[in-house]
Image (cartoon, helix red, strand yellow):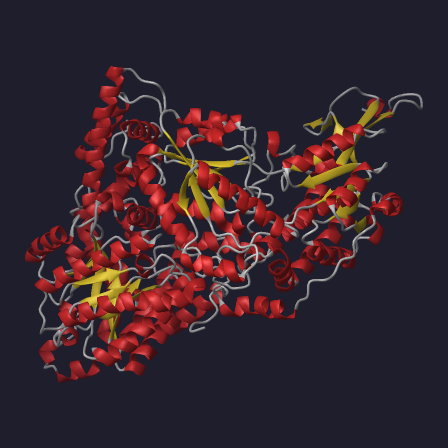
Amino acid sequence: MRLPFPYRPEADIVSHRLAALAQALDWAAAARAATPWVQAVRQNPPPFWAMESLLKEYPISSAEGLALMRLAEALLRVPDAETAIALTADQLGRADFDSAGDKALARLSSAAIALSKKFLPDSDAPTGILAKLGARSVVAATLRAVQLLGRQFVLGQTIGEAMAEAASAKRKIENLRYSYDMLGEGARTGADASKYLASYQNAIQSIADEACSTGACEVNDGISIKLSALHPRFEDGQKARVMAELVPRVWGLCEQAAQANINLTIDAEEVDRLELSLDVFEALAAQVAQHYPQWRGFGLAMQAYQTRALELIEHITAMARRYRIRLMCRLVKGAYWDAEINRAQELGLPAYPVFSHKHHTDVSYLACARALLDAPDAIYPQFATHNAATIAAILQMVSVAPTFAASRAALPPEGALAPWGGPAVLHRGPRFELQRLHGMGEGVYREVLKNPLIACRVYAPVGAHKDLLAYLVRRLLENGANSSFVHQLADESVGMQELLISPLRLEPESSLPMPADIFGAARKNSAGLDLTVQIMRAPLLAAYQAVQVPAVPVFDAKLTAGPLAISVDSYQKWSKTAVTERAAILRRAADELEAQLPRFCALLVKEAFKTWGDAVSEVREAVDFMRYYAGEAERIMVPMAMPGHSGGVALGVTGESNELRLVARGPWVCISPWNFPLAIFVGQVAAALATGNTVLAKPAEQTPGVELEAVKLLHAAGVPEGALQLLHGPGETVGAALVAAPGVAGVVFTGSTQVAKIINRALAAKDGPIVPLIAETGGINAMLVDSSALPEQVVDAVMQSAFRSAGQRCSALRLLCVHEQIADHLIGMIQGAAKELVTGDPADLATDVGPVIDREAYEAIQKHVARLTIESKLLLAPVDIAQTAIKSIASLIPPHAFEVESIADLRQEIFGPVLHIVRWNGDPAAVVDQINALGYGLTLGIQTRIDNRAQALARAAHVGNVYINRNQIGAVVGVQPFGGEGLSGTGPKAGGPHYLYRFCAEQTITVNTAAAGGNAALLAG
């Protein structure tokens, strides 16, 4: 690793940054310098359509602000009028635009929006011809308004248009420069990457035509590029591909920029791509040093909100000195904060890789600024900020930086320093520059740039307005928060002292719960790891080399009576064990499994052919099941007084007490599947044990080894051996014998619908008590996509839902229903993205799709593929590299996709990486009706920006788990209870608050408290 561990205590890092700033900054002086700028902006506010004014009038925290953001994000890409009308009605209908703002134009816009709403139908409601005409007019006007909004944030839709706008701005303010961003927000396909590459090449050529080839590179306009826009798999697991394919592409752009004497900055990416970005950056820096050592325009953007920002600057500075080149460094505060927080929580990481307090990011920014200014031989600093106080602090640091001592000494006395740095610092050419985003911060920079010696570069997005959504939404979220300077600047109720308050203070506690604590005090989140961090993945790879899958003897089904008798005997003791003690045992087992995560991950990779990411997720899910069911058992198994209390007074008839309690049922048979041999197995077993039952566990025939190790772990934690027995063997013999055995109190099963029905019939045929069955089976899981959906988001969700785990999840996507207006484009993107997936050895970190579980499954899937090839339209077949992998790895099936004529054409689930795609039009509710008619009901994905539509479709679906605008796999224990209905299972949902009840019987105890001669409690009152 080039940089320190990314998940460190925030307070320790901030303490270090504050120490680095000690004696380096007089904040009170900086605030005094910024005060006149703020006063001038408030006295002469920017126009209504500027970002600051929009945020003041329609804050993101308001329904109105959110509605406008959602319209800006989606409306321009909707191709059909019906969906556009529904989207506009949905979003405008959610907000109250009737309340006027404090400016005439604001009042006019609010009135116009409020009037427009009267012409719109309820979302998705049928409309007549006059209403439709009115609605279409409103949508046309709204489209125009959104396009005008887009112009505030996008300099031009083409590079030529943008450069013309920039030239006009420079004629008004001479000390402006530009860095053009071609709005490449991450390629999903090779075609995307090629398109963005051509866009960058064209832009560089256009900028070069206007650039000065002999002057200082720093004063020319330049370009910003995103590495993730130039390679569809720009991620750590694909490092070999990235270095071989991406570096030459970017070097071609660097050569083009160097020859034109313009600057090229590589934009910042997320934390998990930082080390990879540095690998690419250094490979390019080495070539710059070799071929263009005098070029001073190669640069990198750095995010101060990352806890490693200062170390990153130190690393880049050392790199520049090592190669004897000077680099541009753009310091920004950061643009992916919410995504980084979400990722750390989802992965169960030790800490956050970004600062949780905004003022801690400000501290980091200032410490980084000082480090940049201290390395003028290696770095040309570029300070991107809209915060007036931060600008003043930077200019103050510039004025005292030791770097400029020689310049000051050479000046005559009249060259005395001004508070902002003055001519003594800046007279010898560009030493640094400030930066702002196009459409933002104009008011502050209008004042700052009155000093002609200060230069500002405008970061200017270029591209079609419909492509700006990711950029726009990120900017709005980043600057629309109530705590942001841009928002507060426009709010005159925020006083000057509050607005310019010093950030130079330490908050000892995080503003957010740590990832381990997001579920509160009742349950700790399972600890995970970041596979992109070498020291975190190393124990997994070491465990893989050391671990051996244990041999598990096959149980003789004829001997079932013996284990059953042991289970019955153990039940008498285990069921009487206090629920708190049973819960404590499960928590100890969870802690031990968490500690042994590398070993169990290695077992899953070796025996179940899991990829590393899937293996880590499965171990964590097993840990979560044990902790969650331990807490749930303690909650529900407390006797409940009936009918209850009100105001401290017992309700009901006097003279008696009534109590409802839950009790264990007896020995349960737990039959688990091979696709989640640890998580589902542990979940079933933990639920039964937590409620006082004993368990006869029948593991999947293909994966008994990992279950055996789990049983050993539970025994070691304190579960009696008689309370949990593992009986391995074929379902037809061992499973059938256990289900048929007398004395079995219940069966919990996860597997195919066919086997679930066999078990159900076997239980019904038994004499004796009616035995409960909990069955979770598969399904023909669908995803409905309308024309308002974001295509990139849909493609990501489809790749994960259909092909992750080789399609061998009960929840996996089988049927994709795409609106006909966007079908061709979306199918093309899916084809391109699927071709980028790596099919191969699951032990290889680069592998996305490993083999299916065994030869039997492989042959069954191949039969379906052969049939579909004849009956349907083949959309996706194995690429050459996948064909090579197939020849060397058994049971490997690359992703396949077929277009079918109708939803009804799907007759059964294909449990593998095979996706069916169907086009639809008309009423989306009718599509859900057709999905319901299939009879399955496990998962459904809905991709739409029409909120009312999403909720209505979810209500209409006979489906257990509905996922809106995300993938449809990976249900989290205690957060997304999982289970289906119809052909997909019986319920209750695993990992939910109702699951344990099925493992229990209910008992009511009524006591006549007056039996001894009277109601003493009543008489005493």
Q: Residue furthest left?
A: 171
Please identify the quadrant where the C terminus is shown: top right
Relative image position of residue 684 (x, y in whole percent): 70, 44
Please identify the quadrant where the N terminus is shown: bottom left
Q: Quadrant of residue 597?
A: bottom right
Relative image position of residue 239 (x, y in whole percent): 41, 66
Query: 252 left or right of 348?
Result: left
Q: Residue furthest right?
A: 1012
Q: Quadrant of residue 392?
A: bottom left
Above or below: residue 773 compared with residue 137: below
Relative image position of residue 379 (x, y in whole percent): 26, 75
Front residue (pair 977, 822): 822
Query: 91 left or right of 172?
Result: right
Is residue 395 at all visible to an observer of this figure? no
Relative image position of residue 992 (x, y in whole percent): 63, 39
The residue shown at (68%, 55%) is 590
Front residue (pair 240, 732): 732
